[in-house]
Amino acid sequence: MQGERDEKSKTKKIESRDMVQIVAKDNQEDILIVTTWDCQDNIEFAMFQSRCERNQNPENYIIRGMNNKLNYFMDEHQIYDLEYQIPQ
């Protein structure tokens, strides 16, 4: 079917918070998408998109946060705080 996309996704639990991060990759466009979902209020907390390498798995870009922090996105150019939506 024309227009279908091959996507990979993974869900990561955020320690001591009622949130999950859904990590997905659009393989046709080489775009990584990280959506943080607040399960308590049932709303999107944050969303992040970035270009990624064609042969990399999406979970290779995510680093676990420490001390109640959300996770971080990291590639060869930057480390990005997924809680405050700013580069580090």
Image (cartoon, rainbow, N blue to C red):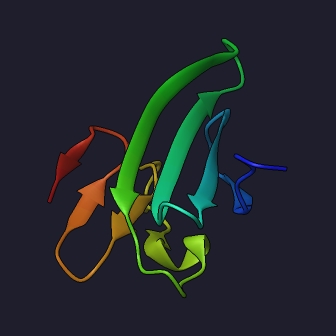
In the image, residue 50 above or below residue 76: above
- Measured as percent of width and height from the top left, residue 16 is found at 62, 44
Residue at the limit of the structure toward the right, as seen here: 1
- Indicate left or right for 33 with 40 as reference: left
x and y, in percent, of residue 75 in the image = 30, 77
The reply, left or right, for residue 44 in relation to residue 79 is right
Judge left or right: residue 66 versus residue 81: right
Residue at screen point 51% across, 49% down = 34
Q: Position of residue 1 (x, y in %)?
A: 85, 50
- For image coordinates 50% across by 67% down, the residue present is 64
Q: Is residue 81 above or below residue 30?
A: above
Residue at horizontal 55%, vertical 37%?
Answer: 36
Residue 52, compared with residue 26, is above or below; it is below
Residue 15, visible in the rendered structure: no
Picture residue at 73% right of the left edge, 62% below the top = 6
Q: In the displayed orientation, state which residue is furthest to the front.
A: 2
View extreme (bottom): residue: 55
Quadrant location of the C terminus in the rendered image = bottom left
Residue 58: image x %, image y %? Answer: 57, 70
Q: Is residue 59 visible?
A: yes
Residue 28 figure quarter = bottom right
Q: Nearer the viewer, residue 29 or 69?
A: 29
Task: Count all numbered tags in the image, as a single digit.
Answer: 0
Q: Is residue 16 left or right of residue 29?
A: right
Name, please, the residue furthest toward the top: 41
